[in-house]
Image (cartoon, rainbow, N blue to C red):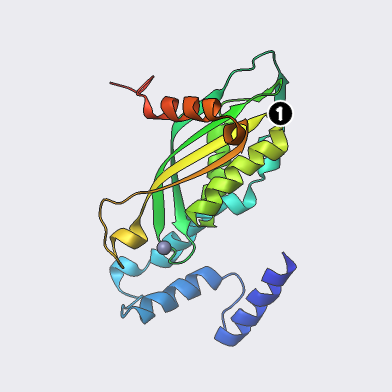
Amino acid sequence: MAHTEEALRQLRAALEIPAGQEWESVVRLLLRLVGEDPTREGLRRTPLRVKQSLQFLTSGYRSDPKKILSRTFTVKHDEMVLVKDIDFFSLCEHHLIPFFGRCHIAYMPDKKIIGLSKIPRLVEAFSRRLQVQERLTTQIAEAIDQHVRPLGVACVMEASHLCMMMRGVQKQNSRAVTSSMVGVFRTSDKTRAEFLTLIRSNLGSPG
Ligand SMILES: [Zn+2]
């Protein structure tokens, strides 16, 4: 990412930030801007902690969906594969405030399946970035469509947005639901209905 390197160099020069100290300097500046004293006891290690947590929360930029989905197995199975209630946590790109919830993903194999654990890993690869929920939902479905080539993919995400709950409209209990349907999930009412019934049922949930 050459453009980022150059932008970083310019920012450093403008703020007189020594190389390797970007994160800490920026967080210290941020603390000053909110009216805090970054040198007080409780905040002394905050710049380092913010750096580490933000790097983790955006680690999806450094994982490759294509690689996650690269190993497929040839099978006769031609029924829907569904992984539901996958917890996810993401950061809203407008406010850098979390949104989080559950995600349900299904695909209809065309003689090829992927390891089930790959699906939550794919969700992490896309959710640990700056996102809007609509795009996140589409990216997950499109990645499976593109790299596994099934007959269809469905992805439904339900999420609470802290940027709505803590500020702005302050709607405490509203949840946003987004969906992306590809292939047979779009063209066949029966397949889509089966998927929606399965994600609403309590089949297999503890208790
Ligand atoms: Zn937001």
Please provide percent x and percent y for residue 24: 48, 70
Left or right: 22 as drawn, with respect to 109: left
Work out whether residue 128 or residue 142 is closer to the camera in this orientation and state it. 142
Q: Quadrant of the N terminus?
A: bottom right
Please provide percent x and percent y for residue 54: 48, 58
Q: Residue at left 70%, top 41%?
A: 66
Please provide percent x and percent y for residue 46: 38, 65
Looking at the picture, which amino acid does disc 1 mark? Arg
Element assignment for label 1 = loop
Work out whether residue 81 or residue 130 is closer to the camera in this orientation and state it. 81
Q: Ligand 1, what quadrant?
A: bottom left
Please provide percent x and percent y for residue 67: 70, 39
Residue farthest toward the top in the current orientation of the protein: 76
Q: Quadrant of the C terminus?
A: top left
Residue of label 1? 71
Q: Quadrant of residue 76?
A: top right
**Residue 168 vertical placement versus 183 (above, below):** below
**Residue 35 vertical placement versus 126 (above, below):** below
Residue 49 seen by the camera: yes
Q: Residue at left 62%, top 38%?
A: 182
Residue 56 seen by the camera: no
Q: Residue at left 26%, top 50%?
A: 173
